[in-house]
Image (cartoon, rainbow, N blue to C red):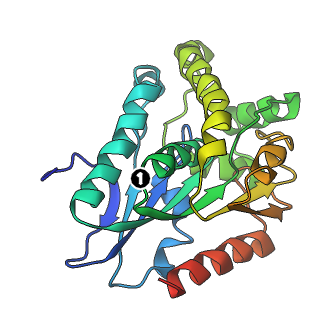
Amino acid sequence: MEKLNFKGFKREVDNSLYSVVFCHGILGSPTFFDFLTPLISYDISYYSILLDGHGGKVQDFSKTSMKKRKQNVSDLIEYLISKRQKIIFVGHSMGTLLGIKEAVKHKEIEHLILLNPPLVAHYPLSTILDNLKAIYTDSNDPKIVAIKESSSVTLSKNLFLYLGWIPRFIELLKFIKESRTTLKNLTTPTIAFHSLNDELVSNKSKDYLDENKNIKVLLLNSGHYYYEESDKNLIIKEFQKILENL
């Protein structure tokens, strides 16, 4: 693959042996990983992808599909493999599922870092209320601010526009179920960060992670989008360890 149709942020380094791939979650943004990108030395390339249907309006997200998002990631991984790159894949939420899928297929992905992998999802009333606050208020609550900042989709106060999102979330639920089976075949060295107070991911997700001996599970006390400083530092520490050992 000579050319890549890529959207997002990237730093391509000539003759780099490694690339770090960052992949956000559903409705997410490449900027979610801004606390990690400065840690990458200048002899390593990185790509923080913007998935199809993201970065625009509510209606744009309605027109995307899981198939297109899977293809976005697959195209990037195949492009890097064609350049004889070894890969560290860092995903958040849905992005972790896309990473698992690719790592099972490609041995060139040497390390996986999974942030809040949603192997079992839940959506309590408190989460619905938090999302409504993000749409309709200017709350300074760190959780609400994090929801807004993590979204690459420009939110609308017209709730009817969100009806087009229903098929997208049905696709996600199907992908979650599929990923629980895929996870059993994962042999890539993996660090998974599970948040005990995650607003979207059930603690049952940890049970699936624990079943795979190739996954090191570390627990956070934060939520799905907002990381307490101590938890953020733990993620940084583990990421630095991987980079230092390349």
- Whether residue 44 is situated above or below residue 118 in the rendered picture: below
At x 58%, y 50%, the residue is: 150
Q: Name the quadrant containing residue 234.
A: bottom right
In the image, residue 29 lies at what x, y percent? Answer: 49, 49
Q: Quadrant of residue 202?
A: top right
Q: Residue 104 vs residue 127: left or right?
A: left
Residue 122 vertical position relative to residue 160 in the rendered view, above or below:
below
Q: Nearer the viewer, residue 232 or 16?
A: 16
The three-letter code of the residue at mark 1 reads His
Q: Is residue 45 left or right of residue 186?
A: left
Which residue is identified by label 1?
106
Residue 175 drawn at (x, y percent): 58, 29
**Residue 90 appears in the figure:** yes
Density class for disc 1 (Cα within 10 Å; few <14, some 14-19, many ≥20) is some
* Residue lying at 42% horizontally and 35% vertically, measured from the top left: 69
Is 113 above or below relative to 245? Answer: above
Residue 238: percent from the left, percent from the top? 66, 76
Most extreme residue toward the left is 2
Q: In what element is the residue under mark 1?
A: loop
- Residue located 35% across and 36% down the image: 71
Please tell me which residue lies in front, 145 or 84: 84
Image coordinates of residue 217 in percent, x first then y, are 77, 61
- Residue at figure coordinates x 46%, y 54% from the top left: 30
* Up-down relation of residue 110 to residue 142 (above or below): below
